Image: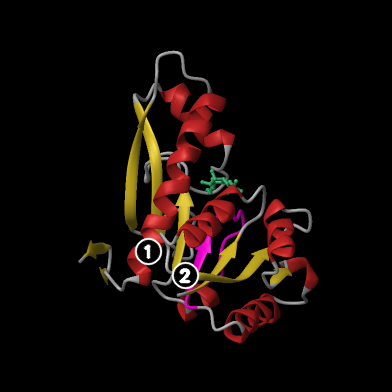
């Protein structure tokens, strides 16, 4: 499976995907890394690993259409089959979502639909979970539509919230779960085991 990973930051989920591929747990090849952020760790990883990479964002273009076309051209050139958003903090445009319908995944560090939506990313999510007094949080891997965090879930995993939890300790626990769950979800696609009918996602 030819995979593109879009990331805005550190890129630990990209690292985990590359490790799963190396171990033989994920039958995929990362053929493109895309970032809106020039200094993203994910781009450094791509450079170090010899993976084609692209720093691209809307500000480089005169119109939404020109931006979408450049992005789609890069995906087409690398014959990308599945796109994995991994800490990518930009909304994917309707044109890209339409072209890659049901083939763009995202990972979110909470149990959607709780604690998701525009502006809910990273530590803000974990702080909101603690402020609410939740006893569990977790990870959601879901399909991407053109809203933030609103596509149907593919896999979810719970993580217990301890009494003494801090946003930092919860983030670390959730991230460990993310690193396992994302590759598992992607492997389901690699094996062609995912059936999608509207919001119903079934794993065969
Ligand atoms: C991850 O925790 C991911 O779930 C989160 O950003 C982090 C990226 O970490 N994404 C969101 O909050 C999206 N709403 P990474 O750059 O180390 O993979």
Say what secondary structure mark 2 lies in: loop
Residue under the image location 33 percent in, 47 percent down:
156
Disc 2: which residue: 28
Residue 151 showing in the rendered view: no
How many angstroms separate mark 1 from mark 2 (CA)? 8 Å
Q: Nearer the viewer, residue 196 or 177?
A: 177
- Residue 199, image x and y in percent? 28, 63
Residue under the image location 64 percent in, 77 percent down:
71
Tell which circle, 1 or 2, labels the residue nearer the N-terminal end: 2
Q: Nearer the viewer, residue 192 or 120?
A: 192
Q: Residues within 10 Å of mark 2 (few under 14, many from 20)?
A: many
Colour setup of the view: secondary structure
Disc 1: which residue: 187
Q: Is residue 27 left or right of residue 46?
A: left
Residue under the image location 67 percent in, 50 percent down:
9
Question: Decide: marks 1, 2 in contact (CB < 8 A)?
Answer: yes
Q: Quadrant of the C terminus?
A: bottom left
Membership of 110 in magenta stretch: no
- Please state the extent of the stretch shown in magenta in the rendering: 81-94
Q: Is residue 4 left or right of residue 45?
A: left
Q: Residue furthest front?
A: 23
Q: Residues within 10 Å of mark 1 (few under 14, many from 20)?
A: many
Residue under the image location 45 percent in, 75 percent down:
1
Above or below, 87 relative to 132: below
- Residue 102, image x and y in percent? 39, 71
- Residue 88, image x and y in percent? 60, 56
The dominant secondary structure in magenta is loop
């Amino acid at each position: 499976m030819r995979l593109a990973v879009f990331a805005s930051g550190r890129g630990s989920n990209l690292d985990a995907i590359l490790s799963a591929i190396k171990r033989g747990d994920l039958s995929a090849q990362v053929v493109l890394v895309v970032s809106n952020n020039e200094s993203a760790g994910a781009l450094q990883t791509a450079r170090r690993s010899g993976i084609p990479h692209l720093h691209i964002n809307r500000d480089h273009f005169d119109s939404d259409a020109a931006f979408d076309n450049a992005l789609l051209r890069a995906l087409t050139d690398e014959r990308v089959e599945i796109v994995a958003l991994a800490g990518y903090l930009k909304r994917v445009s309707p044109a890209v979502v339409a072209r890659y319908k049901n083939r763009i995944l995202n990972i979110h560090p909470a149990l959607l639909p709780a604690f998701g939506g525009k502006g809910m990313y990273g530590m803000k999510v974990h702080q909101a979970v603690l402020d609410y007094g939740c006893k569990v949080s977790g990870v959601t891997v879901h399909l991407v539509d053109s809203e933030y965090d609103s596509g149907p879930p593919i896999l979810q995993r719970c993580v217990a919230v301890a009494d003494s939890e801090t946003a930092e300790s919860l983030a670390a626990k959730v991230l460990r779960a993310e690193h396992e769950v994302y590759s598992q979800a992607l492997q389901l696609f690699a094996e062609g085991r995912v059936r999608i009918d509207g919001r119903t996602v079934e794993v065969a």
